Image (cartoon, coloured by chain):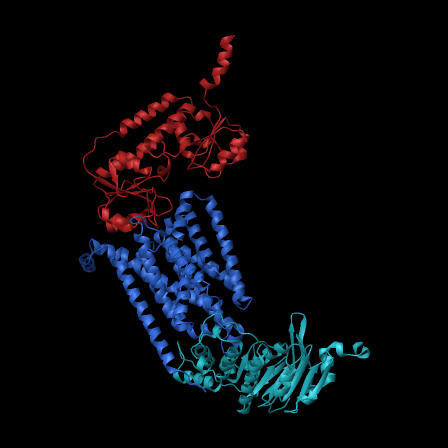
Chain colours: A blue, B red, C cyan
């Protein structure tokens, strides 16, 4: 009878710790890069202690932007992991269950009825989230009848997204081309748009669901075995799916309301990290938060400085990066 | 006898004026009124009540959705539109139905704008009025520089920040006003990094109040540049104004350059 | 209904839409029995297993486990008593064997984030006993069918159940692995485990089960020791196939030989 080889397990533990350390270092580097790009050390240091000049830029532009990139990137990473587990598909991503369509509709309606005249800078975030909520309620109500069966949820999510998108295009066809242009650009992702006064609200709102999701690591492992086997191991799939659906949809809706639709983060980061640190979900959730934050911060730096002073929509940058990485991974396996 | 034939041949060319004109865009309508050609206007688009007297005109839909059936039923001899304001296929559709359509090309500067205006004046058989308007505007536009560099940011959109750069048509308004655009890129309407704007500390920010909330933007810019002044303009200025509204915009800018207080409104 | 039976199924019926899948099933299972559930395809065997496991609820009748109705147990506590292995387990993610097996301790380990050292130790022990310790760090989707089935079984065993329910545990394995897995089950039975398994191989069922329940079209056709259940009359009636039943020289249990039609005389063929 062969012994269970201990050294291999010990090695793997060390390797995993190493990866987490690397991720953290990368994340810190990206934050520093985002805050100090293009400026020399003395400017940055002076800026930390003053409210003028670069200090103003730092406090009002770079820090808020980096904070949002961190929170949104991490949230999308964690949502991606959760959805990939529920749907038992390593290529699922946070928008699969229809949130983006609803949010787009909310924002388009906001532009049409000139909500910004009433709500000012709060128009987009509030209306975007309202739209996302509508989509969540629709998919929830439909899914309830099917005990939140994941395959049904995907279908309902796709249908909801299609319907909402159609309405959005319908409205677009009536709008001035300029208004349409602006709405479209925002929907491509923008980490600078959120009014700074809203950030203190978004920080706990974005952190809370993510933290709760961290606690579901073991359940996600078991759910990935399928509803029946999960049942036999002591998990109640319909209830679990329901809670996870609400948590991820609300979190994704909050992200879209804050910064538009930023794709690929929720798909690529969990996918890549799973191949590096393995499938168990608890550590995958933590790693995906760090990885997602890093990926989005770096993408944001690119979007700001690749064609400086012209800025690219960050969703375009994540799309290109993510697409290339995915292409590389898929062609490599063959 | 020969005179008769000559007249028959030359008459259409001489009398190139149109009697039943439909305008597909409010700016063209405005220009027609400036040229005293409103009696030739059979129908117009949009739902504005300006200029005075326009309220009575028949409407044929909006600039983006002209009512083709109605247009045809009115039997116009000329339909006027523009490439940036009206859908291209409308022109094709009407042409296929045998109706004469003329789309003005997009002006890239004031000179193009004048050319379009003069072209219109010829169609309305009122070249003199056209020349008069243009000359009057050109006179007012002329100015001696005061040697001061008036830096301007022309904001077209917020969230994300989109501006009209030195390559845009709007830049001509800045130029004539004696200002300089802080954004110099090849793209006419680039999406901008806010930091770049703050770096240049523009004196005046032009807000074209479309799709975003003017007050919020004013607050935002005041946060970064305390002494900044604002000019609010109709969004259609960015596309293709009439020569008169072009001049009005230039004047607003000039006032802002020399005012010591914040806004024009 | 026997009062001291571990599992009592009384008058159970189950319908799927308009179709009656199971009709008036009555079955008592004593502690320590190894029961083979056999029958033609579509007879309702898997449905019965799912009802016993608590995944489905009967439309009529009751199921009582250890003196309490099945529906009174919450999922987690039921999982501490009954471990179920469905027919197929789809694994979309690259878990290693040890990561996978320790999941079987979920019903016991209430801590967040990870499994305790004791749980991992138990998984390790089970792997050793089943001779798959060397596979601990391997990814499940790189294993052979036989190895994988052992891993799935190990996950069930680490649940420390009293009852093991298995749906076709060896159907797609080669002879070697079929025997290995069934021998493991035999060993577990020796330690007191009650086992109900659906098998489509009649002879394997005969060898390893002390009792066989033959289900046909939603009802129990016969229920008893292999010698009584596996008669040529029963088999031919239920499976509509001519068979010869002989006695296994080593175990003395019946084994079934299917007879190809080409060996039949004209009289037999007219059946």
Judge by depth and name the residue closer to the eye, C86 or C98.
C98
| Residue A106, horizontal then vertical, whole percent | 44, 54
Which quadrant is home to the C terminus of chain B? top left
Q: Is residue B201 above or below residue B242?
A: below
Residue located 36% across and 63% down the image: A292
Residue located 49% across and 54% down the image: A164
Judge by depth and name the residue closer to the eye, A57 or A318.
A318
Determine if residue B111 is in view: yes
Describe residue B190's horizontal placement relative to residue C46 as left or right.
left
| Residue C33, horizontal then vertical, whole percent | 59, 89
Residue located 51% across and 58% down the image: A158
Q: Quadrant of residue B206?
A: top left
Determine if residue A216 is in view: no
Q: Residue furthest right?
A: C267
Q: Residue furthest front?
A: C263
Residue located 37% across and 35% down the image: B240
Q: Is residue C134 above or below residue A318?
A: below
Judge by depth and name the residue closer to the eye, C166 or A173.
C166
Q: Quadrant of residue C264?
A: bottom right
Q: Residue furthest top?
A: B1
Q: Is residue C209 above or below residue C264?
A: below
Judge by depth and name the residue closer to the eye, C215 or A164.
C215
| Residue A271, horizontal then vertical, whole percent | 42, 65
| Residue A155, horizontal then vertical, whole percent | 53, 61
Describe residue C62's horizontal placement relative to residue A211 as left or right.
right
Figure disc tally: 0
């Amino acid at each position: 009878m062969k012994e269970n080889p201990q050294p291999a397990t010990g090695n793997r533990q060390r390797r995993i710790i190493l990866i987490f350390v690397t991720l953290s270092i990368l994340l810190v580097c990206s934050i520093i890069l985002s805050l100090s790009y293009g400026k020399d050390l003395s400017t940055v240091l002076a800026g930390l202690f003053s409210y003028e000049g670069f200090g103003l830029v730092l406090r009002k532009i770079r820090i808020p932007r980096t904070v949002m990139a961190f929170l949104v990137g991490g949230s999308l990473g964690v949502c991606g992991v959760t959805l990939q587990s529920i749907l038992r598909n390593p290529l699922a991503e946070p928008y699969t269950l229809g949130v983006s369509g609803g949010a787009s509709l909310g924002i388009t309606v906001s532009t049409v009825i000139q909500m910004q005249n009433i709500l000012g800078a709060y128009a987009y975030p509030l209306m975007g989230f309202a739209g996302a909520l509508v989509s969540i309620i629709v998919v929830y109500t439909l899914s309830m009848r099917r005990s939140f069966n994941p395959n049904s949820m995907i279908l309902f999510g796709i249908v909801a997204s299609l319907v909402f998108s159609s309405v959005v295009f319908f409205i677009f066809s009536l709008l001035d081309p300029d208004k349409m242009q602006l709405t479209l650009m925002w929907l491509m992702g923008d980490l600078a748009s959120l009014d700074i006064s809203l950030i203190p609200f978004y920080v706990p709102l974005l952190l809370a669901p993510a933290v709760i999701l961290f606690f579901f690591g073991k359940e996600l492992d078991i759910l990935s075995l399928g509803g029946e086997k999960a049942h036999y191991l002591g998990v109640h799939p319909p209830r679990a799916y329901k809670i996870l659906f609400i948590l991820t949809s609300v979190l994704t809706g909050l992200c879209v309301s804050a910064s538009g639709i930023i794709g690929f983060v929720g798909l690529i980061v969990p996918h890549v990290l799973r191949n590096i640190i393995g499938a168990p979900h608890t550590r995958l959730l933590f790693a995906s938060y760090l990885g997602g934050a890093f990926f989005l911060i770096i993408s944001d730096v690119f979007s700001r400085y690749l064609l400086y002073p012209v800025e690219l929509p960050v969703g375009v940058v994540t799309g290109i990066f993510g697409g290339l990485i995915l292409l590389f991974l898929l062609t490599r396996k063959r | 006898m020969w005179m008769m034939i000559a007249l028959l041949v030359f008459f259409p060319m001489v009398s190139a004026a149109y009697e039943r004109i439909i305008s597909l865009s409010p700016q063209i309508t405005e220009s027609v009124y400036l040229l005293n050609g409103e009696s030739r206007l059979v129908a117009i688009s949009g739902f504005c009540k300006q200029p005075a007297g326009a309220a009575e005109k028949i409407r044929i839909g909006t600039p983006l959705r002209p009512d083709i059936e109605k247009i045809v039923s009115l039997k116009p001899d000329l339909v006027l539109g523009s490439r940036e304001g009206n859908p291209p296929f409308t022109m094709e559709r009407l042409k296929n139905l045998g109706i004469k359509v003329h789309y003005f090309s997009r002006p890239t500067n004031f000179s193009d704008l004048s050319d379009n205006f003069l072209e219109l004046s010829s169609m309305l058989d009122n070249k003199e009025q056209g020349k008069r308007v243009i000359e009057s505007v050109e006179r007012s536009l002329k100015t001696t520089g005061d040697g001061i560099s008036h830096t301007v940011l022309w904001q077209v959109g917020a969230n994300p920040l989109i501006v009209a750069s030195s390559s845009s048509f709007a830049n001509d308004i800045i130029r004539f006003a004696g200002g300089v655009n802080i954004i110099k890129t090849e793209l006419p309407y680039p999406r901008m990094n806010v930091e770049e704007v703050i770096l240049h500390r523009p004196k005046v920010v032009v807000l074209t109040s479309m799709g975003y909330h003017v007050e919020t933007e004013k607050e935002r810019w005041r946060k970064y540049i305390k002494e900044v002044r604002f000019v609010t303009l109709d969004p259609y200025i960015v596309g293709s104004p009439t020569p008169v509204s072009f001049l009005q915009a230039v004047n607003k800018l000039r006032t802002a350059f020399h005012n010591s207080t914040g806004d024009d409104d | 209904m026997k009062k001291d039976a571990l599992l009592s199924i009384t008058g159970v019926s189950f319908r799927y839409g308009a179709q009656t899948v199971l009709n008036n099933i009555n079955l008592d299972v004593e502690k320590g029995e190894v029961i083979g559930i056999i029958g033609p395809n579509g007879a309702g065997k898997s449905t019965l297993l799912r009802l016993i496991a608590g995944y489905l609820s009967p439309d009529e009748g009751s199921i009582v486990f250890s003196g309490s109705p099945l529906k009174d147990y919450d999922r987690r506590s039921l999982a501490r008593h009954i471990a179920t292995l469905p027919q197929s387990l789809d694994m979309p993610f690259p878990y290693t064997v040890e990561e996978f097996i320790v999941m079987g301790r979920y019903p016991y380990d209430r801590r967040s984030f990870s499994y305790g050292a004791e749980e991992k130790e138990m998984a390790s022990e089970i792997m050793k006993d089943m001779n798959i310790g060397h596979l601990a760090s391997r990814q499940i989707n790189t294993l052979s069918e036989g190895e994988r089935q052992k891993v799935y079984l190990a996950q069930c065993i680490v649940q420390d159940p009293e009852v093991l329910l298995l749906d076709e545990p060896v159907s797609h394995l080669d002879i070697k692995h079929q025997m290995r897995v069934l021998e493991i089950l035999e060993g577990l039975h020796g330690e007191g485990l009650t086992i109900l398994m659906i098998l489509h191989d009649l002879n394997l069922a005969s060898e390893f089960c002390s009792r066989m329940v033959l289900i046909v079209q939603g009802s129990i056709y016969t229920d008893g020791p292999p010698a009584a259940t596996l008669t040529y009359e029963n088999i031919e009636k239920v499976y509509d196939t001519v068979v010869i039943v002989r006695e296994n020289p080593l175990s003395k249990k019946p084994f079934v030989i299917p007879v190809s039609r080409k060996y039949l005389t004209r009289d037999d063929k007219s059946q």
